[in-house]
Image (spheres, rainbow, N blue to C red):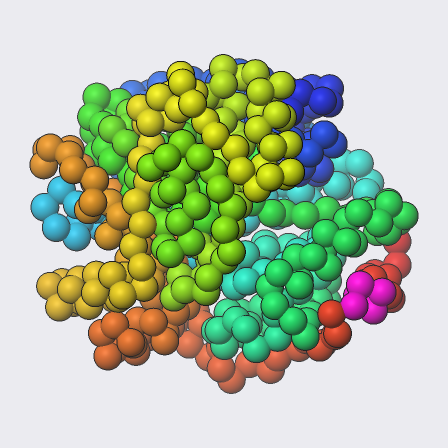
Amino acid sequence: MRYVSTRGGVPKVGFDEVLLTGLAGDGGLYVPEKWPEIDLRKLGRSGEASYAEVAANVMMPFVKGSVIEPELFEITNAAYAGFSDPAVAPLVELAPNEWLLELFHGPTLSFKDYALQVVGPMLERVLNARSASATIVGATSGDTGSAAIEACKGREAMSIFVLHPKNRISDVQRRQMTTVTADNVFNIAIDGTFDDCQTLVKALFSNKSAREELQLSAINSINWARIIAQAVYYVSTSLVLGGPEKRAVYSVPTGNFGNVYAGYTAHCMGVPVECFVVGSNSNDILTRYFESGAMTAADVVPTLSPAMDIQISSNFERLLFEAYDRNSIAVAGLMASFKKDGQYTVAGEARSFIDSLFCGYRIDDKGALAVMRRIYEGTGKLIDPHTAVGIACGRQFSVQPTVPRVTIATAHPAKFTDAVQLATGVKPELPNTLSDLFERPENYVCLPNDIDVITDYIYSERPSP
Ligand SMILES: *Cc1c(COP(=O)(O)O)cnc(C)c1O
C-alpha cells in the first residue's frame, strides 16, 4: 500500500515511512492511495476469530509491502495478550439495543492502548530493520503519555521523553507514567500548562539539527498506524451486531477526531454505519461546524473530560480530503485559510458528503455529570466523564429503535476519580493490575518552561547512539 498526503505536496510513500514520519513534509496527513475492502462474512461472526486475528486481517492491506507484513499477526497477538478482558474490546448492553464498547481493558485504562500497544512494536521492527534508533518526544494532558510510555518501555531502539504540565494532570495519570521503571523512559514535569508543553515539543521538532541528531519521532494521534489499529474495534463490533447486513450508530467522544475517523476507515472497508455521532464537551468547535458549515477556532475551556479539551481536531483534514473528492488543492486552501484567519467554510457537495454520515452534538459538564449519576442509579455502573459525553450526545440523535446505538467508552472510571465521585458519590476502584499504583516510587524531573533547558536535558539523558 502507498500513501498520499492530503495536501498533495510530497511523493507517495510506503507504510514504514508513514509510520516513522507521522506528519507529511507538506504539513498534510497521510492517507492510503485507495481504500481496501474486507469481507466481513469471511472474517466470521463474533467468537470465531480472536480479536488479535481480526486485528491482523483488518490491518494487513495497509501494511502490504512493509517489513511489518510478515510479522503482523505475531505483533497483534502479543499486543492484546495482556488485556484484562478476554474479548479485548467487549460490547456491554446498557439498555435495550444501547451498547457500550469498553475500550479500557489495556495496561493504562484508556482506548489509546488499543492503538499504541501495536504501534510501539511496529516502530521497533521498522527501526531494527534499518539499524536505526529514535527519540520519541511528546506532550500529554493525561492519557496519551502513559499509553505511549507503556508501548515503548524497554524497547532498545527507542527512548521516550514525555512532558506533562506540573500539578495539572490527575495523580493516577501522573503515577501511570512516573512509576514505570524502564531506563529508556523519561518523564518531565513542566512549570506551565499543557499548551506550554506542546509549544516546547513543537519548538524542538522545528530545530533541524536536533531533529536529525536525535532522530526525533512522535507517536501522536495523526500517525496513520494508530488509525488502522483503531479501525479494528469498529469491525469487531459490527461482527457482533450483525454486519455487514445491519447498520449501527456509533457515538464517539471526540477530541482530535482520530477515533471517529478510524470508524470512518472501517466504514470505507465495509462496516455498515447509520451515523457517526461526534460528541463534544463545551469545547464544541465540531458541533458548531455541523450546525453552520464553518470551522471556527475558539479558546479552550477546561472541563471534566480533559482529553477532549481541544481547539483543533487535526484528523478532520483526512475527512475533508474525501469530502472534496481527494482534491488536495482544495484541502490545502482550507487549511491555509484556517491558519491565516482561524476559520474555513465547507459548502455544497463536500458538506452534504460529511452530513450524510456524521452529525455532531455537545453536552456541558453539568449534563455529563447528570448522565453519570443516572446511569449509576439505573444500572450500578460507573462510567468516566468522556464516555458520559458520548452517551449523552448519542441520545440526542434520533433513530429507529431497531438500530443499535454504540457509545465508545474511551476510559476507565478510575482514571477520573474526582468527576465520578462528584457525580455519584462513589469512588471507582483501580483494577487489580494497578492496585498498588500509589505505593510505587515515582521517577521524574521538574524543569522550567525553557526550550534550551529541555533540549539540553534530552541530549544529555538519551542513550548514546
Ligand atoms: C484521547 C481521548 C479522547 C479523544 O479521542 P480523539 O481520537 O482525539 O478524538 C477521548 N476520550 C479519552 C478518554 C481520551 O483519552
Seen from the viewer's position, the closer of residues 101 and 370 is: 370
Q: Please tell me whether residue 435 is drawn above or below residue 344 in the rendered image.
A: below
Q: Quadrant of residue 146?
A: bottom right
- Percent of width and height locating residue 46: 26, 35
Q: Residue at x 74, y 70 (%)?
A: 449
Verify whether residue 69 appears in magenta: no
Magenta region's main secondary structure? Answer: helix
Left or right position of 384 against 440: left
As drawn, the residue found furthest toward the bottom would be: 439
- Percent of width and height locating residue 360: 32, 40
As drawn, the residue found furthest toward the front would be: 341
Left or right position of 140 against 171: right
Seen from the viewer's position, the closer of residues 409 and 117 is: 409
Q: Residue at x 65, y 71 (%)?
A: 192
Q: Please tell me whether residue 220 is drawn above or below residue 109 in the rendered image.
A: above
Q: Quadrant of residue 291?
A: top left
- Percent of width and height locating residue 326: 54, 17
Q: Is the N terminus in the top left, top right, bottom left or bottom right quadrant?
A: top right
Instruction: Decide if residue 206 is in sight here.
Output: yes
Q: How many marks?
A: 0
Q: Quadrant of residue 57?
A: top left
User: Residues in magenta?
Assistant: 450-454
Instruction: Decide if residue 182 is in sight here.
Output: no
Seen from the viewer's position, the closer of residues 73 and 294 is: 294
Seen from the viewer's position, the closer of residues 28 and 104 is: 28
